[in-house]
Every structure is written in structure tokens, then in C-alpha cells.
Image: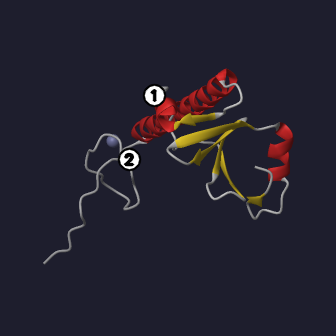
Amino acid sequence: MAFTEPTRYCLWCKDPLRGRSDKKFCDTSCRNAYHNQQDHNTAHLIKTINYVLRKNRNILAELFEMADEQTTFPAAVLLYKGFQFQYHTEVQHTNSPAPFFICYDFGYQAVKDEMVRIVPISKDLLCSWHSGNGTGRRSGI
Ligand SMILES: [Zn+2]
């Protein structure tokens, strides 16, 4: 019984491929079209995530500015404003039990009763974290 190679298909146009076994595309135009699409998808992904991060940062800034002394808000208020908790620029594990999430120049931390504490992050504080010994354990917050 003759060995039949499984049919492979062009990653772009899905036509069956002939020739070299490592071939992925019919020709240069299929390869270029495929890579252009990949670049487009990547650019779109980056743009979308940047938008969410900026929006999160602006929600934190807006709430912090309208706060008097109390800078703790119900998580539901952030959600209502469109905050997406899974997007942040970094995480700091401080001496407190809950991690501290950063969105550029604002940080937030879950506190009791579904509340979120918002803290502006100074450039000095960010620098002190970034120049630390890399353990991620910091004091101060
Ligand atoms: Zn093709």
C-alpha cells in the first residue's frame, strides 16, 4: 500500500499545497496576504488593550479626584463605569495581604466588602519599586 502524505493546505487561501513538505503557502502573494493579516490582527489587539488600559486609568483618576478623604469605592461603581479589572500595567505585592494593581499612575487594591481603594502612584514610588531587589515585596502601601 502506497504511503500517502496527508494533504496540506495553504494557510491563506486553503488550496491544497504541492511541492516541498515545509511549504505553507501557494506563492508569495498568499504568504504576503497572510502576514499582512497577522500584522493587522496584532495592531488591532494592541490598540484594543491600550484603549482598555487608558480607560481604566481615567476611571481611577476620575474617582480619586471626586473623593474627599475617602478614596475607597464599591467595586460595582468601577464596573459600572466600564472598569475591567483584568487589565493593569503591573502588580505589586506589598506587605498587605491583597496585591496592589497599577494602571500607569494610579493603583488599586481590593479591600473588605467588595470595596476598592484607589491610590495615586508617584513617579518616585514607581522608580523605587522598579529599582528594588526584584523580590516584589515592598513596604509603604
Ligand atoms: Zn494560497
Q: Position of residue 47 (x, y in %)?
A: 55, 30
SS label for mark 2: loop
Instruction: Decide which of 104, 15 is in the foreground and name it.
Output: 104
Q: Is residue 62 visible?
A: yes
Q: Of callouts 2 and 1, which one flags the residue occurring earlier in the amino acid sequence?
A: 2
Tell me which amino acid carries mark 1. Answer: Tyr
Q: Which residue is mark 1?
A: 80
**Residue positioned 76% across, 38% down in the render:** 121
**Residue positioned 28% across, 44% down in the render:** 14
User: Quick check: is the Cβ at mark 2 less than 8 Å away from ligand 1?
Assistant: yes
**Residue 48 vs residue 105: left or right?**
left
Dot 2 alpha-carbon crowd within 10 angstroms: few under 14, some 14 to 19, many 20 or more: many
Q: Is residue 93 above or below residue 69?
A: below
Q: Which residue is mark 2?
A: 25
Please state the quadrant of the image where ligand 1 appears.
top left
Q: Is residue 8 above or below residue 121?
A: below
Q: Nearer the viewer, mark 2 or mark 1?
A: 1
Q: Position of residue 91 (x, y in %)?
A: 65, 51
**Residue positioned 58% across, 32% down in the render:** 56
- Name the quadrant of the N terminus: bottom left
Q: Residue furthest left?
A: 1
**Residue positioned 30% across, 54% down in the render:** 18
Q: Position of residue 135 (x, y in %)?
A: 75, 65
Instruction: Decide which of 65, 15 is in the foreground and name it.
Output: 65
SS label for mark 1: helix
Tell me which amino acid carries mark 2. Answer: Phe
Dot 1 alpha-carbon crowd within 10 angstroms: few under 14, some 14 to 19, many 20 or more: few
**Residue 7 vs residue 72: left or right?**
left
